[in-house]
Image (spheres, rainbow, N blue to C red):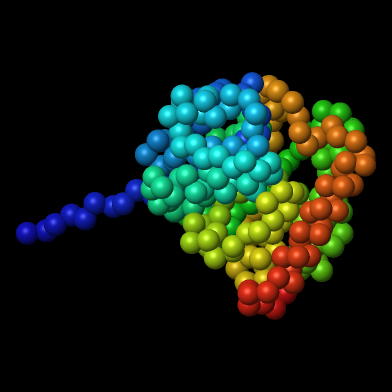
Amino acid sequence: MVYKVKKQVKRYGIIIPVFNEAACLGQVIDELQQELSGQHFILAVGLNGTSDESGAIAASHGVVVGEAVERGYGYGCQAAIDALAEVEEVEAYIFCAGDGASRSQDIEALVQRFEATAAPVVIGLRRFVLRTWWQQFGRALPNLILGAAGFFLTGRFYHDLGPLRLIEQNFFQSLDLQEMTWGWTIESEVKASRLGRRVETITVLERPRVKGEQKVSGVSLRQSLRIGVHILAAGIRARFAHGLPDAKI
């Protein structure tokens, strides 16, 4: 007699950090639930310092909801991850925007590259659509500051620190990320480089936010410089953090 072993379906946790996105969050969740297979993906919203109805909206849509009192991108991500861990274990975390900028097609492309290469980190590099030169410049400036020091930090040039990325679950836990605000994204990339782990990239298209207030682009030059300096400082801290073995970079 031949017994057929049922193949286990891989599950991916879509991590959505949220700060006051009530104006668009319901629409964003609806789109992801409609266009992504519930068999393969589970959505987790992480609130960080939110003062609007984002939490109630997320809960009404049946997604996992975690909450952190502190405001900061990393706090939101970690709150969603902690809440998801109480529900089920996933193959990898996929970090995406809560304002509708991330497309479901690009989320699926991240998974395809991850499964094809087994790289523990897959990053979506944004192909910008120029709307206003100031918005483009304000968003690009922090990345240009980081890119100038990219070889010093990791041995590679970073031209984007977009939110859409996939990190394998076990590898994510080993990174022990500490930068809970602007440095959350660069810390994972620097530590992956230090460990000598492969980082894959794909090109993604960032859309305009659905509704609500833009929190990154459109800020003043002074604010853009401040963000860039924070990111650079976080990268330097990650590069020289204790407790990680260094690969040759």
* Residue 245 appears in the picture as rendered: yes
Residue at point 41% right, 47% down? Answer: 86
Image position of 143 (left or right of 167): right
- Against 179, residue 62 (above or below) is above
Q: Quadrant of the N terminus?
A: bottom left
Residue at point 93% right, 42% down? Answer: 222
Which corner quadrant of the image does residue 121 belong to? bottom right
The mark total stands at 0
Q: Residue furthest left?
A: 1
Residue at point 59% right, 62% down? Answer: 176
* Residue 204 appears in the picture as rendered: no
Place of residue 47 in the rendered image (x, y in percent of width and height, measured from the top left): 59, 37
Place of residue 112 in the rendered image (x, y in percent of width and height, measured from the top left): 50, 49
Residue at point 62% right, 41% down? Answer: 69
Q: Quadrant of the C terminus?
A: bottom right
- Against 231, residue 131 (above or below) is above
Place of residue 11 in the rendered image (x, y in percent of width and height, measured from the top left): 41, 47
Image position of 15 (left or right of 19): left
Image position of 56 (left or right of 135): left
Q: In front: 97, or 178?
A: 178
